[in-house]
Amino acid sequence: MRSLIESLILGGVFVATTAIALWSQAPAQKPSFEVASVKAASGNSLPRILGQPGGRLTVTNATLKLLMTVAYGMRDFQILGGPNWITTDRWNIEAKAAEGTLYPPPDGTDLYPITLMVQSLIEDRFQLKMRRGTRELPVYELLIARSGSKMKLSEDQSLPPFLQPGDSKPRGLIAVRRGSLEGQGVRLASFVQILSQQLARTVIDKTDLNGLYDIKLQWTPDLDQGAVSRVPDTPLPVTDAPFPSIFTAIQEQLGLRLESAKGPVEVLVIDSVQKPSEN
């Protein structure tokens, strides 16, 4: 479930911090939830997308576009086309997988079944048809700083287990607040995805660093740099802390650097989509 839970934490809930579940990696036959309910939502509460132990998925007040960013590991600007309602209409979803289907592959290279199940759900219930493409867009390249990497390898290099009840700081997840992020036993790809979310620009890893890392980063965000994700039920920290910009913080605290470039960015182009019937 890590690829769903690693990708995004929105509205105060852990959600996939890198759905490194890129669409191009998905098998032809995707697994599906055993049961799923999709209903139109009302109210102005923050969207919540929560994966829970036991193969349960709870979605509250989320737009289809938000669900797509989580399921396919994309950001808003990478999803093109579609009617306006995919960004305005909100949905509540309750889904459950069959027992024994959610455990991760042993080598960590394949997609977690939960991520593919979310893809299957929205493709089926919303009759979503799309195609993958690329656009030449501004990107940031993540490189090792001239002073050398300060990245700390996690003592435990085994893949983090499936999320367990009561885990307050589960390995493999990155907790992101406004102006800070922290995670234990995370892949660099997860960190790169979070940076892409914070900077609203694709970050491409050029470090050649492998393994699982314990990462802590603190910076002073720009006024327009929102907290894309944060830990449940925690207030946003004061933003006038004496930390540098995110670019300087990455170099000083992690021994990495961001360099502007242009490169191919994967996009999803929506060909057709429909509102689901409630059930």
Image (spheres, rainbow, N blue to C red):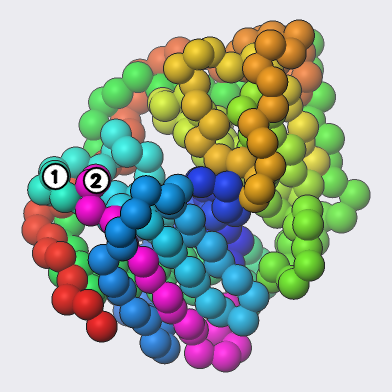
Residue at (30%, 59%) from the top-left corner? 42
Numbered range of the magenta stretch: 87-102
Relative horizontal placement of residue 134, taking residue 229 as reference (left or right): left
Residue at (69%, 27%) from the top-left corner? 237
Residue at (50%, 13%) from the top-left corner? 223
User: Is 65 placed above or below 201 here?
Assistant: below
Magenta highlight on residue 154:
no
The quadrant of the image that shows the C terminus is bottom left
Q: Amino acid at mark 2?
A: Thr
Relative horizontal placement of residue 120, taking residue 242 as reference (left or right): left
The quadrant of the image that shows the N terminus is bottom right
Q: Which of the 4 quarters of the picture holds residue 118?
A: bottom left
Local secondary structure at mark 1: loop
Closer-to-camera residue (40/97): 40
Q: Which of the 4 quarters of the picture holds residue 168?
A: bottom right
Query: Real-space Cα distance between discs 1 and 2?
Result: 6 Å
| Marks 1 and 2 in Cβ contact (< 8 Å) | yes
The percent coordinates of residue 95 (x first, y second) are 43, 78
Closer-to-camera residue (40/146): 40
Q: Amino acid at mark 1?
A: Asn
| Residue receiving disc 2 | 87
The percent coordinates of residue 123 (x first, y second) are 24, 68
Local secondary structure at mark 2: helix
| Residue receiving disc 1 | 84
Neighbour class for label 1 at 10 Å: few (<14), some, many (≥20)? few
Instruction: Kindly tell me whether residue 97 is visible in this rendering.
Output: yes
